[in-house]
Every structure is written in structure tokens, then in C-alpha cells.
Amino acid sequence: MSVLLITGTSTDVGKTVVTAAVAAVALAGGHSVAVCKPGQTGVAVGEPGDLAEIQRLSGVARTVELARYPDPLAPDTAARRAGLPELTLAETAAAVDALADADLVLVEGAGGLLVRLGDFTLLDLAQKLGAPVLVVTAAGLGTLNHTELTTRTLQAAEVRCAGLVIGAWPAAPDLAAECNRTDLPRVTGVDLVGSVPEGAGGWDRARFTAAAQGWFDPAWSPLS
């Protein structure tokens, strides 16, 4: 089993769509894939959440959600407000380990690397599992600072960064976005391994899965 954790430099940078794209690429390569979303927030019971979107886009069949909280907040805060139990590092690591028969297990975090999912962050989970982290970042102004802060934190914790992915590359990129494609790997020392077109999350599965392979560096593999 290979485990890959997926985080963002902030909220709304495209983590869910990138997770779906990585799953689609692995499935197209003949690998079995499972996706875990430890804490889903801002979605009521019975409503489709991030895992439903990943399934719709990629076709992955095996998904696990450990907790759901109604308020659109960090999971630990949302749990306290709802009077529901917070997730623990131990139970989350055990849930990922239970998917060990899959070739690839993707774990999508909430917000950024240090957002508290319960009594832990995604960084803590990466350390516990000994797994790398793929960082989804924005294209435009401000992304260099946010991305370097995230990659430096991973480096300080001795967690391997599996690469950077721009979560929503605009159809008409401005000067900042064009420069950031060069500057992101330069300032972080981490390869830019992919870029997903803006709006791809609104595509149907056939179009999404057919295009996903072309969004990543051919030399990069989510299983490595």
C-alpha cells in the first residue's frame, strides 16, 4: 500500500478536484484506489460531500469518511460546536491502515496543513503514517508565501513533500500566475508536478478522466 496525503496552502485551492485527478490517474494505470476524508465540515447528514465529488469525477468506488460536522469550520471547532466527538489521531491512522489492501490510499485533509482535524493535524497524521504529502496551491499573487510556509513546515517535521500542484490554473493567466509557475519550485525547492485547469471540477467523468493524465508531469507517480 502507498499512502499519499493531500493538503492545501489554504481553503478553496482545489484539494478535492486534485484528489479526484490523482485517483483518476492511478485508476487509469490499473491500480486499486481508496480515498479517506477524515473530517467533512459544512455539509449536513445525507448531503453529498467531498467524497461524493471525488467519486463523481474519478470513478473511485471505495471511500471512507470518519466524521461529519454541519458548520463550515475547522473540524475540531465544528465538532465542539455540534457537541460531537472530535476525531483522534489513533482512530484516523487505524482507518487508513484498514485500507491497506488498496494499491493507493489518498487522504484529503481540511484546509491547510496545520488545521486541526481533532486532536491532531494532517502533519501529525503524515508523521504517524510515515507518508508523504502532496501540496495543492493557488496560481496567483500570494501563493509563494503560503506555499513556502507549508513546504518549510513539512521539511522541519521531516515529512517528504510529494510535489506541488496548482489546483486551478486559469484559462487566461495573469503575470503573477505565469511567474509563479517558475518561482514556486525555485523558492520551495519542491517540484511543480501538476496543474489542473480552472473549472475542471464542473466537468463530467468521461471528460475529466480522459484529461487528468495530461495534468501531471509524466515522470511523477502518486505511488512513488
Image (cartoon, rainbow, N blue to C red):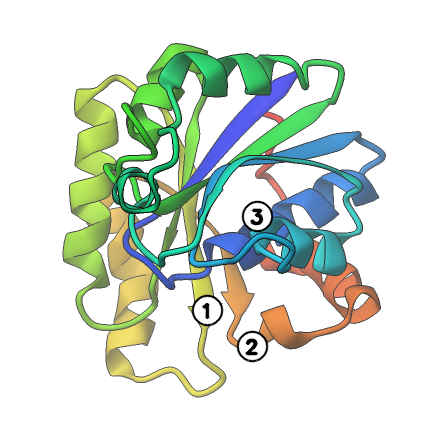
Q: Which residue is disc 2 drawn over?
A: 199
Q: Nearer the viewer, residue 112 or 195?
A: 112
Camera-nearest residue between 112 and 64? 64
The residue at the far bottom in this view is 172
Q: Amino acid at mark 2?
A: Gly
Say which label, 1 or 3, has the lower sequence index: 3
Query: Of the residues tagged 1 and 3, which is closer to the observer?
Result: 3
x and y, in percent, of residue 65 in the image: 58, 37
Q: Are marks 2 and 3 in contact (CB under 8 Å)?
A: no
Residue designated by label 3:
19
Q: Is residue 12 above or below residue 50?
A: below
> Dividing the picture into quarters, in which one does residue 70 lie?
bottom left
Amino acid type of the residue tagged 3 in the rendering? Thr
Q: Is residue 106 above or below residue 180?
A: above
Indicate the quadrant containing the N terminus: top left, top right, bottom left or bottom right: top right
Question: What residue lies at 67% left-to-right and 54% top-to-bottom?
Answer: 52
Mark 1 and mark 3: span between their CA atoms? Answer: 13 Å
Query: Where does residue 178 sit, x and y in percent of width and height?
Result: 33, 74
Instruction: Answer with left or right where residue 118 lies relative to residue 36.
Output: left
| Up-down relation of residue 75 to residue 42 (above or below) | above
Q: Residue at x 62, y 60 (%)?
A: 47
For the question of whether residue 217 can be seen, the reply is: no
Mark closest to the chain's N terminus, 1 or 2: 1
* Amino acid tagged 1: Ala
Rendering coords of residue 15 (x, y %)? 47, 53
Spatial separation of the CA atoms under disc 1 and disc 2: 7 Å
**What's the CA distance linking mark 2 and mark 3?**
15 Å
Please tell me how crowded label 1 is: few (under 14), some (14-19), or many (20+) other residues with Cα within 10 Å. Answer: many
**Going 62% across and 46% down the picture, which residue do you hit?**
22
- Label of residue 168 in the image: 1
Residue nearest the viewer, comparing 197 with 185: 197
Tell me, yes or no, whether the two marked residues, 1 and 2, touch with CB atoms within 8 Å: yes
